[in-house]
Image (cartoon, rainbow, N blue to C red):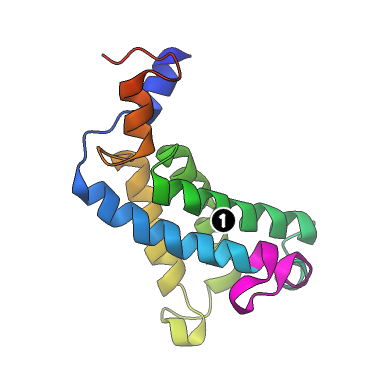
Amino acid sequence: MNKLIHNTLLANAGWEALILRFPIGLILAAHGSQKLFAWFGGYGLEGTGQFMASVGLTPAFLMALLAGSAEFFGGVGLMLGLFTRPAAAVNALTMLVALLAVHLGKGFFMDSHGIEYALALLSATSALIFIGGGRYSLDYYLLKSNILGVQND
């Protein structure tokens, strides 16, 4: 188990991870807050659940809760670089579902609700799965400080 935690937190990237992590995390957290809390003009869980039902994602309330939580909490995790790889993986999966269930068949560009935006977020979060949090992340701090009791090789 220690090896798994170590490999999850370990990342040799520098500024490039932070430059990718922070804005993507901010975007995801903002969208998640729309779904969960109806902030920034969002519809909250009830309205998002109704939308999920309209595109065939059921049980709709649960899907809204899962998507909103992945985006909000995963986005905050990405901004902080806290468990970056799991946060990125959950959001990559969320973006893949959004791309396939909502945007596919509506063209490419955002003006027609096409795949462009979901594809960009899917690409960025997928890259972060491989890159990790980097030197400027809480992952790096947790690994170096041995707070979790994981030996750093």
* Residue 38: percent from left, percent from top: 68, 71
Locate residue 65 relative to residue 109 in the image: left or right: right
Residue at 44% of width from left, 81% of height from top? 110
Is residue 69 placed above or below 44 in the rendered structure? above
Q: Is residue 39 magenta?
A: yes
Extent of the magenta region: 35-47
In the image, residue 133 above or below residue 142: below
Q: Could you tell whether 82 is left or right of 69 in the image?
A: left
Q: Nearer the viewer, residue 27 or 110?
A: 27
Q: Amino acid at mark 1?
A: Phe
Residue 41 image-quadrant placement: bottom right
Which residue is drawn at the image coordinates 35% and 24% (left, top)?
143
Residue 115's place in the image compared with 90, above or below, is below
Task: Tell me: 67 left or right of 45.
Answer: left
Q: Residue furthest bottom?
A: 111
On the image, the x and y values in percent for residue 57 come to 72, 61
- Dot 1, how many residues are within 10 Å of its Cα: few (below 14), some (14-19), or many (20+)? many
Query: What is the chief secondary structure element of the magenta stretch?
Result: helix
- Location of residue 122 by image quarter: bottom left
- Residue corresponding to mark 1: 72
Secondary element at image label 1:
helix
Which is more toward the observer, 119 or 143? 143
Indicate whether 101 appears above or below 106: above
Taking the spot 56% from the left edge, 56% from the top edge, the residue there is: 72
Image quadrant assignment for residue 109: bottom left
**Residue 135 in magenta?**
no
